[in-house]
């Protein structure tokens, strides 16, 4: 036999796929840790008043492969603020959170974060260019990244056991 049908080639291909999964899982875990850390730190940051310069609600309706209708919502916000006489802009609403529901996105766009509205900006005193409008985080983001990392690690172990 020649080509990809040989057992050795299949094992190598499986090992490569497992390695790619593990690298992706590691990246997801690092991202999750970074987001959770930022969310926790943001709770103690000082605040200043800022102004929303733009906010948009993006609603997408679609049908899945089973014919079930779904609605997906995304909210974007841009705001300006000043710390120590220096002007900054940011687009971060929060750290480590899942996307908003349609109701939340519409409420944020129509009320809390509509363009021109004054908002409380929490900023990192060591790096004032880093800021957020909502403090804290949803630790389930880290759980999801950890599960992804764990599954990828299991894939590596299976690949290694086959190689031996």
Image: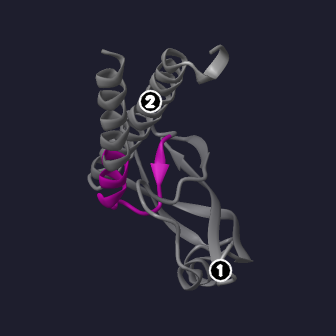
Magenta part of the protein: which range?
Answer: 130-146
Q: Residue at x 46, y 58 (%)?
A: 94
Q: Which image quarter: residue 27?
A: top left
Alpha carbon separation for disc pair 2 and 1? 33 Å
Mark 2 highlights which residue? Answer: 18
- Name the spot of residue 144 as percent of width and height, x first: 36, 54
| Within-10-Å neighbours for mark 2: few <14, some 14–19, many 20+ | many
Q: In this view, does 97 lie to the left or right of 55?
A: left
Q: Is residue 86 above or below residue 114?
A: above
The one nearer the camera, 51 or 36, is: 36
Name the side, left or right, on which 149 lies relative to 67. Answer: left
Q: Which residue was labeled with disc 1?
A: 71
Q: How many marks?
A: 2
73 sits to left or right of 127: right
Does the magenta segment cover residue 141? yes
Instruction: For mark 1, give the secondary structure.
Output: strand
Dot 1 surroundings within 10 Å: few (below 14), some, or many (20 or more)?
Answer: few
């Amino acid at each position: 036999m020649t080509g990809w049908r040989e057992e050795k080639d299949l094992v190598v291909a499986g090992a490569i796929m497992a390695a790619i999964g593990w690298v992706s899982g590691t990246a997801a875990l690092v991202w999750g840790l970074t987001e959770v850390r930022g969310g926790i730190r943001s709770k103690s940051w000082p605040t200043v008043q800022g102004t929303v310069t733009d906010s948009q609600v993006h609603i997408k309706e679609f049908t899945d492969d089973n014919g079930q209708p779904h609605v997906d919502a995304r909210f974007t916000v841009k705001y300006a603020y000043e710390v120590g006489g220096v002007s900054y802009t940011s687009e971060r609403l929060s750290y480590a959170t899942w996307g908003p529901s349609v109701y939340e996105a519409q409420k944020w766009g129509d009320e809390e974060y509509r363009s021109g509205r004054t908002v409380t900006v929490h900023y990192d005193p060591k790096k004032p260019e880093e800021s957020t409008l909502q403090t804290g985080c949803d630790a389930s983001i880290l759980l999801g990244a950890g599960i992804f990392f764990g599954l990828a690690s299991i894939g590596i172990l299976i690949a290694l056991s086959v190689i031996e």
